[in-house]
Amino acid sequence: MRFEGFEQSDFDTFTIEGLDLRMQAIEERIRPKFHSIGHTLVNELSLLTGTELFMHIAKHARRTVNPPKDTWLAIAANKRGYKMCPHFQVGLFDDHVFIWLAFIYELPNKKEIAHNFLEEFDNITKILPTDFVLSTDHMKKESKSIVGLGEDGLRKALERFGDVKKAEFLIGRHIPSNDPILKDGDEFIAFVYDTFKTLLPLYTLSYQQK
């Protein structure tokens, strides 16, 4: 199935009260679109990275009371899961789409990855576009702009990522729910691919042993 774009109703999913009803809406409205986006991106990103990648769609299986505030698909080099390795993410909150290269707290080698990034810090800052944003907690929808952080703020975020067990490092772009690009499936996927292609040096660096 071809991805045709997101609708306002997809974002309205996160205003539905109750776990069961919200999960039903996620299943019916959003997951089919994730499958379409994911099948395209898995193929393209596998070629880009030179590694076989696999799609994972958030199940929210551990939730018993509180409905999820967001949902996402992840693409990673591990067929069985994605949280323990660097991965690409596309997902929705109630007011925006997020596009992340994600390094979350389950990673076993966070300190080594942070070290690699800090070793190449000057080169990394040169490739980051001004519209990129950073998050240090995948559970929160707030992010900080790369420009607003500046080099000092970005360096501190990387240092904290390496030193603090629960610290995370997610970098990429946000698209507001009313942005016209979300209505055009082909344009959106091209934008996502461009974001991940820009971040490829970080993805590659995260797997290098130094």
Image (cartoon, grey):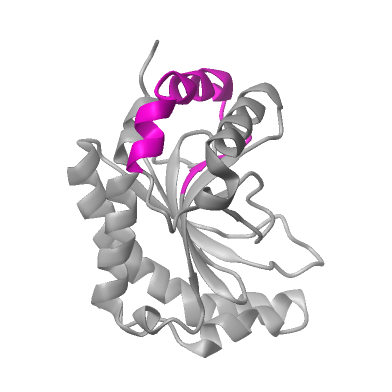
Residue 86, image quadrant: top left
Would residue 128 be counted in the magenta stretch? no
Front residue of 165 and 146:
146
Residue 162 is left or right of residue 78, and the answer is: right
The magenta region covers: 101-127
Name the image quarter holding the C terminus. top left
Q: Residue at x 31, y 34 (%)?
A: 201
- In the image, residue 66 lies at what x, y percent? 79, 67
Q: Residue at x 48, y 23 (%)?
A: 118
- In the image, residue 72 lies at what x, y percent? 51, 61
Residue 195 is left or right of residue 160, and the answer is: left
When the figure is inspected, residue 92 is found, relative to residue 83, above or below; the finding is below
Q: Name the outermost residue toward the right.
A: 65
Front residue of 129 and 63:
129
Name the image quarter holding the N terminus. bottom left
Q: Residue at x 52, y 88 (%)?
A: 8
When the figure is inspected, residue 101 is found, relative to residue 185, above or below; the finding is above
Q: Residue at x 35, y 19 (%)?
A: 208
Q: Is residue 24 visible?
A: yes
Magenta segment's dominant SS is: helix
Residue 192 is left or right of residue 81, and the answer is: left
